[in-house]
Image (spheres, rainbow, N blue to C red):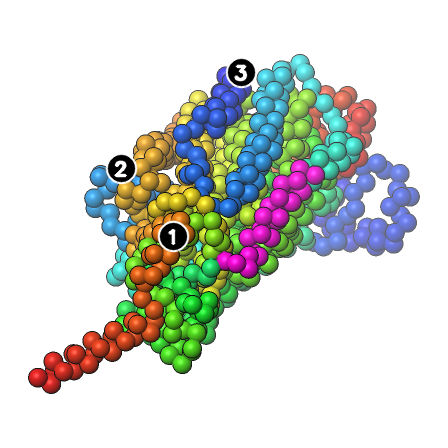
Amino acid sequence: MHAGIIFLLVIVGSVLFHIFTPWYWTDIASNWKGMDDTITLTFWVGGGVFVAVCLFMIYCVFRYQHKEDRRAEYKPEDKKLEKILTWATTLGVAALLAPGLIIWNQYVNVPKNAIEVDVMAWQWGWQYRLPGKDGKLGTTQVRNIADNNPFGINPDDPFGKDDIMVESDVINLENNRPVKILLRSVDVLHNWYVPQFRAKMDAVPGTVTFYWFEPNKVGEYEVLCAEYCGVGHYAMRGGVEVQDKADYEAWLGEQETFEQLSARYEKLNVDGNKLAKK
Amino acid sequence: MSDEYDNNKSYQAQSSEVMDGSTGSVNPDIDYVRPSEVGEQELYHPHSFIEKWIFCQDAKVIGVQYFLTAVFTGVVGLILSWLMRLQLGFPELAGFMTAEHYYQFVTMHGMIMVVYFLTALFLGGFGNYLIPLMVGARDMVFPYVNMLSFWMFFVAVAVLMASFFVPGGPTGAGWTLYPPQTILEGTPGAGMGILLMLISLSLFVIGFTMGGLNYMITILQARTRGMTLMRMPLTVWGIFTATVLAMLAFPALLVSAIMMTLDKVLQTSFFMPTILKAGEVLEYGGGSPILFQHLFWFFGHPEVYIVALPAFGIVSDLISVHARKNIFGYRMMVWAIVGIGALSFFVWAHHMYVSGMNPWFGFFFATTTLIIAVPTAMKVYNWILTLWRGNIRINVVMLWCLGFIVTFVNGGITGIFLGNVSVDVPLSDTYFVIAHFHMVMGIAPLMVIMGAVYHWFPLVAGKMLDEGLGKWHFWITFLGAYSIYFPMHYLGFIGVPRRYFEMYDSPYMTSAVGMNEFISIAAFIVGAAQFILIFNIIKTLKTGKKAEQNPWKANSLEWYTSTVPPEHGNFGDRLPVVHRWPYDFSVPGAKEDYIPQTTAPSEVIHTEVEKT
């Protein structure tokens, strides 16, 4: 008898915890509200099933407790009941799967007007690159990476010259404009994750992966690495600043292009050689 | 025993009669059971202490050896989890712990619990002990190979534990061992540690194959007369299907371990692309890190069911026996086990939705994953429908079963979140995932293991475990574990990422500090409560009440051995003959509320028993 009461308290407690929990979503700041909604839907359906199954179990514990003079029912199968339950479950599952797939379809199809942001990860930090006026990122190769070419841009690629190099672990984004995050890694797996944007994807060395979102709330956000990448994983932070169009363009104007960066290093080199000669 | 057939030498004369088809129906005897087609297995009986207890060929002893070794690794895994929880809840008390240590503990805890504890315990432990007894065999069909299987496992455990003592310590790559970081500087134990891990896993797979062949062939070939496949207890069905899965899935782990060893030792590039480290390009190029993930999860997802299916089977039997009612929808239960097993090979990439694999895979794997929810839900319905209109004993065994239903349904439903591709995006790699898989494949199977220990201890040791201590053990474990993992899901909603040694002052973590302390305290208590069981076992062995034969009034063959505990050969002079399924409880018209599998139809002629 006590057992049934304790189980009942556990189920009631779970429901109350869910209603009154202070721990819940970090406020969303992107277009992926559909993910939150699907989770809420899954909570209603799944939570309902959980509560129903457990309450039924508890009812049985109370109602059919062992008595020496009683016998259980003897009925090996009930085809009709099993059929009803199978179809009801199938329908419920399909109802949850459908919105999940619809949103996934949006997730893997990047809108045409998205700005590309090239995120490069290494143990343990982030760096960013944006396309220049031509709207195209230059091709890259890990072997080209050097102090004067942090992304390993192919020097012969004309699209690379005007690429904008952000020398910071914080990237600025324009509010209400879709961004396609291109992820690259030079060493191990990483994952560029901002909880408020909901979206994430691993950066995999040897290939370029992507995902997209549309930030819709001006503010500063913390970037976390969400794929274990060695002993510095927990400290691999970065930042995002979402700005209105005017602020964003002002910021963009201050950034250096790949050409300017190369020139600066060349000058440093020349100066350095001069010093060495003296 | 009611069987009137002499199964010694006369079977050969009979078998020709039976084989020509028509004679079966001509025979008017309702108790008729087809004679055996082969003679009895010859057993090698031990001649010395070493042959009896150490290099032993008796599956029951091997089962106990597997059990004890697995429990030892489980205790190590438990201690590692305490250390992790100390760091997460009370970092100021864990000053001795560096990030390296933390990641090593995380890795070893995961690998030990999944492979060396749960898998070895269910298949090596319960499988060895119960299969021959439940199908009515004298032993496994290849006893010598079975013995080698355990000792290979033992060496695998020794190699794994040795990695704690090599320079650099054990690997800290996470139990998933994702390359490239696994074998590169920057991950703890990237030298000797990871090599020993890969060697240990390879040994485990080799040893497990030896055992697995035994389990499969014994179940298929060595069942006693009358034990048709559809009369087997669900425990045997669960273990059988899990073994088939293991035979198909473990090779993927073995090849990935070998390939990674080659990448590490010979600088091959199976999984290693061009890598820049500390300003230098390493001697690798052209490999694919994602290939490893496919191989790993092709093993790893069936692995979840390798643990879950035996648990499903065992819990079905425990519920049926203690509710004094036949398992509801036995045939549906069997097909669900087989169906889940088959489907489990088509869902692996749901662990990889955000891995960078081709995103179009997401549609396929989300669909297959959610399909698997249907047979799984059917099993849950059938468990609770078995309780319905039952005559339920609320004893310690039943409590563990009820605890299993609550935690399994909870963890199964969070699985629908994570399987549903776009819902997985915000939740993957957060504490939601940790909470989900601990609930569904940590706590739920553990509930079954505990129930099974209390249920079968009287058979193994001939003594009854203390019910009072058992109830304390159950309630502390159930309430404690539930309060660890239920709130943990909500940390995942906040966005707290997993595998973080420390959160600094991130906004995600500041709100979670209190909960982390609470979870840690619960974890310390739940861990400590497990020693109640160890105390209970020691106390029972010393002073416990002697168990009568078949104390639970069960029907399956393991309770009808010639002695308790069963001796080598299990059934004395004659193997039992089976006339029915093991679930004839509370049959109307029967004298007792149970009819053993060995009871012939003529003995229960006036009952309304259904033919099985």
Q: Secondary structure at mark 2?
A: loop
Mark 3 or 2, closer to the camera: 2
How far is disc 3 from disc 2 in space, using C-alphas?
A: 38 Å
Mark 2 neighbour density, 10 Å: few (under 14) some (14–19) many (20 or more): some
Image quarter where the C terminus of chain A lies is bottom left
Residue at the spot 21% in from the left edge and 46% down from the top edge:
B96
x and y, in percent, of residue A58 in the image: 58, 22
Q: Which residue is mark 1?
A: A246
Q: Is residue B550 left or right of residue B477?
A: right
Mark 1 chain: A
Q: Amino acid at mark 1?
A: Ala
User: How far from the left and from the top, in percent, is residue B379?
Assistant: 64, 37
Tell whether A135 sits left or right of B281: right
Q: Which mark is residue A153?
A: none
> What amino acid is found at the position of numbered circle 2 in the picture?
Phe
Q: Which residues are magenta?
A: A91-114
Residue B12 rendering spot, x and y as whole percentages: 78, 54
The crowding category of the residue bearing disc 1, from other C-alpha atoms within 10 Å (few below 14, some 14 to 19, many at least 20), is few
Which residue is tagged 2? B90
Tag 3, which secondary structure? loop
**Would residue B53 be seen by someone viewing this image from the given angle?**
no
